[in-house]
Structure formats: C-alpha cells, structure tokens
Amino acid sequence: MKSNRMLIVAIIAIVIAVVSISSCSAGLFDFLGGNTNTTDANTTNTSLKGQEVDLAAAASLKNVYDEKLIPMFEQKYPGVKVTPTYASSGDLQSQIENGLETDVFMSASNKQMNALVNESLIDNDTNLQFLENKVVLIVPKDSTANISSFEDLKNVNGNIAIGDPESVPAGQYGKEVLNNTGVWGDVESKLSLGTDVTAVLNQVAQGSAECGIVYATDAKSNDNVKVVCEAPDSALKTPVIYPVAVTKDPKHPDAAKEFLDFLQSKEAKDVFTEYGFTIHEQ
C-alpha cells in the first residue's frame, strides 16, 4: 500500500515537472520571438514614429485635410507628421517635375497625374481613381443677378471667375462646360483667371467677380457664396476624378503607404463624403 502511494506521488511529481518545463519552454520561445502568431496591438501605430509624410494636394482638398484628415492620421500614428503643400494640380505637377520632395500626390484631374506617370515620377501601382466632384456655377450670397444656368453667362456684364485652364483642373472643366453650352466665345473676354480654385472662390465671395465656376465642395465650404446650378452631364463629359498615388521614390515609403491605406479606410472616406466628395467606385 505504501509503495503504491509513493508511486502515485512520483507520477504526480513527474507530470508537474513536465508541465512546468513545457510552460517555460513556450515562454522562452515567445521571448526569443519564435511565436509569430503573437501581435502587439500597439506596434502598428508606433513603428512609424519620427517619420513624415510630405503631401502635395490640389487646393480644393485643403479644408478636408487641414480640418479633419491630417489630425486624424497624426492621432492614429503618434510621432508621424504630415506636411502638406496645396496649389493647383498643374502647379504641383510642375513643382514635382522640378524636384519637389513629396511622398503622396493627390490631383484634381487625371491629366496631371498621368503626365507624372509618363515621366516615371509616380508609382503607378499605387495610382487610385479615388474621389469624384461636381462643377458648379456660383454667385455671391446676396447676389440678385439673373443667373440660373451656364447659358445665362453670355448676358453677364461683370467678371466671371474661373481657374486658368492652362494649369487649373477646375478651369479646364469649366472651359469644357462653357464650350459645350455654346457660350465660350461670348464670355472669354469677361473671364478673370484664378491661380487655383480657392482664388476663384474668394473672388466671388468678396464680390470682385459677378459669378464663378468652382467645385461643389468649394462652394459648400464658404457661406458667402451660393450655387445657382450644377454643370449638366451633357456639358461635362470628362468626369471630375481625383487620383492619388505614392511618388516613384518617396523619402518616407513606409509612412506614405500607411497614409494611402488610411485614406481608403471607412473613417477617412466618411470624412470625404461629409465634405461633399463622392467616393469613386473602382
């Protein structure tokens, strides 16, 4: 009986020892990095600490980035700084061609993006047809002018603000609308050209132009203007697409990739929608 009891005790001791050794081995294995299934939830947000994202974006994106998206990204990735440069897409194209260091480019038109792709300055594998916008005709908030359509512009006596069609996508779209509605020849001499869509918006808001052609998102951002009409589909056959991509040799490739992924998240897309953009269906 006594020998049986001692045998049972010995077996229990052996079992305890085996379990202890197994646990220690597993712990050591994890400590040495052998357990690849263990994920630290915080590593994603801290691995980019100290990096930057240099962003070149069309002027019409300034409000949504400065007010919401950049603070959201920097909060999600503590220690990462986003430095934006805003201008007309054509101006940004020229700056990138002339050596502007940028990690991510977001244009208000495919024309500028495609030009940079053809010059091997954009990583075309990351090139996304991302957002859509609308072209609208605006007047000052207190305007009593009899303007309700693009055809009415031929009767305007004052200035008509529009982005420079040579370099500003909003101006290129505006010219297309004016041509397709048959009034370009009547209004060309009345045009006041802006360096970007924000300049056009300000001309109308301040009353230095009787009306202007901007994006719907810009009109929505300023309480001193009102929309009188939207460009009809028959007059604007070129969709207003905002592509976004990482540049060919980004200075901060990891941070640039995370920023592009962030823009495609539901939380970021909801913000773009809040500001009046439409998410382009791929």
Image: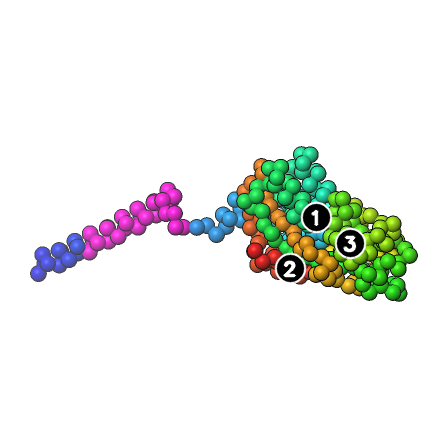
- According to the picture, the residue beneath numbered tag 2 turns out to be 278
Q: Is residue 10 left or right of residue 19?
A: left
**Residue 8 drawn above or below residue 48:** below
Identify the element where label 3 is drawn: helix
Are circles 2 and 1 on residues that touch, CB within 8 Å? no
Which residue type carries mark 3? Asn
Percent x, y of residue 50:
58, 41
Give the residue displayed 82% in from the left and 53% down from the top: 184
Give the residue displayed 51% in from the left and 48% down from the top: 44
- According to the picture, the residue beneath numbered tag 1 turns out to be 58
Q: Earlier in the sequence, mark 2 or mark 1?
A: 1
Instruction: Rate crowding at label 2 as few (under 14), some (14 to 19) or many (20 or more) other CA atoms within 10 Å.
Output: some
Give the residue displayed 73% in from the left and 58% down from the top: 235
Which residue type carries mark 1? Ala
Q: Earlier in the sequence, mark 1 or mark 3?
A: 1
Q: How is the image coloured?
A: rainbow
Magenta segment: 12-38
Can residue 80 be seen here? The reply is no
Residue 28 belongs to magenta span: yes
Q: Is residue 138 left or right of residue 94?
A: right
Identify the mark at residue 179; answer none if there is no mark.
3
Q: Nearer the viewer, residue 110 or 139?
A: 110
- The Cα atoms of the two marked residues, 1 and 3, are separated by 24 Å
Q: Is residue 4 left or right of residue 68?
A: left
Q: Quadrant of the N terminus?
A: bottom left
Total labels drawn: 3
Q: Quadrant of the C terminus?
A: bottom right
Residue 242 belongs to magenta span: no
Quadrant for residue 225, please give it.
bottom right
Q: Nearer the viewer, residue 214 or 10?
A: 214
Q: Earlier in the sequence, mark 2 or mark 3?
A: 3
